Image: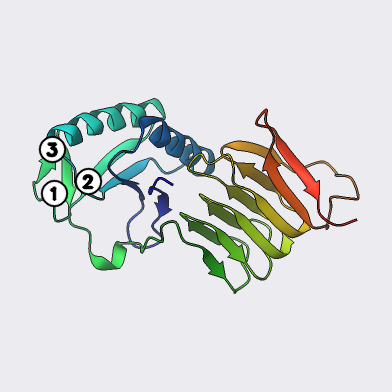
């Protein structure tokens, strides 16, 4: 699984961090930008976090491609995070900044994040891996994972799995009642009344072989 994720910083600064690891594909970055624009239309600033060993020449070429891709989506590469391998003041005119520790977000990669507290309205939970919610998800809340999502209570809000492009990701809900569901960029809003064997039932959401969202009731 590719270790990269868009993370919202709820602190002092208003930007998103896109982590880049060696071997990442440009199409994966483009997919990240696409999801970002779909969920956060107002914010345009992206800070790049290059994690791992990069050859400077390859880094420059990759940065050019990322910058061009960002422009296509109307986004701005604001700056690059300084680390042990990047100590210069700037690369290709993009400043390198040293963010205070209080503004850096702890990343959890390829691990399951267990959420024992209710996910109330306005809260966003993100993880590069699976997410397990042991209680409920309220209206206007968001659960976003690169892997699978399990919700062992009523699932309202927006439930988004496979955000890094993993079409094998699945969503499991104990009580199905969301505003929106998505797997690997395939979205469905739940505005119309659904069959009785789906609403408030235990449901599994997956993609079929034609990349259509498939809702499967797990209880009669």
**Which residue is tagged 2?**
80
Measured Cα–Cα span from mark 3 to mark 1: 9 Å
Left or right of 28: which side holds 101? left
Q: Which mark is residue 217?
A: none
What SS does tag 1 mark?
Answer: loop
Residue 33 lies left or right of residue 59; in this view the side is right
The image position of residue 193, as x and y in percent, is: 86, 44
In three-dimensional space, the C-alpha distance between marks 2 and 3, rounded to whole angstroms, equals 14 Å
Residue at figure coordinates x 55%, y 45% from the top left = 162
Labelled pair 1, 2 in contact (Cβ < 8 Å): yes
Q: Position of residue 208 (x, y in %)?
A: 69, 35
Look at mark 3 in the image and give the residue it sits on.
56
Q: What percent of the width, then of the height, locates residue 187?
A: 64, 38
Q: Residue 86: which disc?
A: 1
Asked where in the image residue 114 lies, by quadrant, the reply is bottom right
- Disc 1 versus disc 2: nearer the observer: 1
Badge 2 density bin: few <14, some 14–19, many ≥20, Cα 10 Å = many
Q: Position of residue 16 (x, y in %)?
A: 37, 49
Q: Label 3 neighbourhood size at 10 Å, few (<14), some (14-19), many (20+)?
A: few
Give the quarter of the figure containing the C terminus.
bottom right
Mark found first going from the N terminus, 3 or 1: 3
């Amino acid at each position: 699984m590719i270790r990269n994720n868009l993370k919202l910083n709820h602190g002092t600064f208003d930007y998103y961090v896109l982590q880049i690891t060696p071997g990442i594909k440009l199409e994966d970055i483009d997919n990240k930008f696409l999801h970002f624009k779909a969920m956060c239309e107002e914010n345009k600033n992206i800070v790049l976090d290059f994690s791992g060993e990069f050859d400077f020449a390859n880094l420059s070429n990759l940065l050019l491609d990322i910058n061009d891709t960002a422009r296509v989506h109307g986004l701005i590469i604001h700056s690059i995070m300084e680390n042990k391998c990047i100590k210069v003041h700037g690369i290709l005119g993009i400043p390198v900044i040293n963010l205070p520790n209080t503004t850096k977000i702890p990343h959890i990669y390829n691990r399951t994040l267990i959420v024992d507290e209710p996910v109330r309205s306005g809260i966003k939970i993100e993880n590069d891996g699976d997410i397990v919610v042991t209680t409920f998800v309220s209206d206007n809340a968001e659960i976003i994972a690169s892997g699978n999502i399990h919700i062992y209570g009523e699932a309202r809000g927006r439930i988004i799995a496979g955000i890094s492009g993993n079409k094998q990701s699945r969503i499991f809900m104990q009580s199905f009642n969301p505003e929106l569901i998505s797997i690997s960029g395939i979205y469905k809003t739940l505005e119309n009344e659904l069959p009785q064997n789906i609403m408030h039932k235990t449901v599994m959401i997956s993609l079929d072989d034609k990349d259509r969202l498939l809702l499967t009731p797990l209880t009669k």
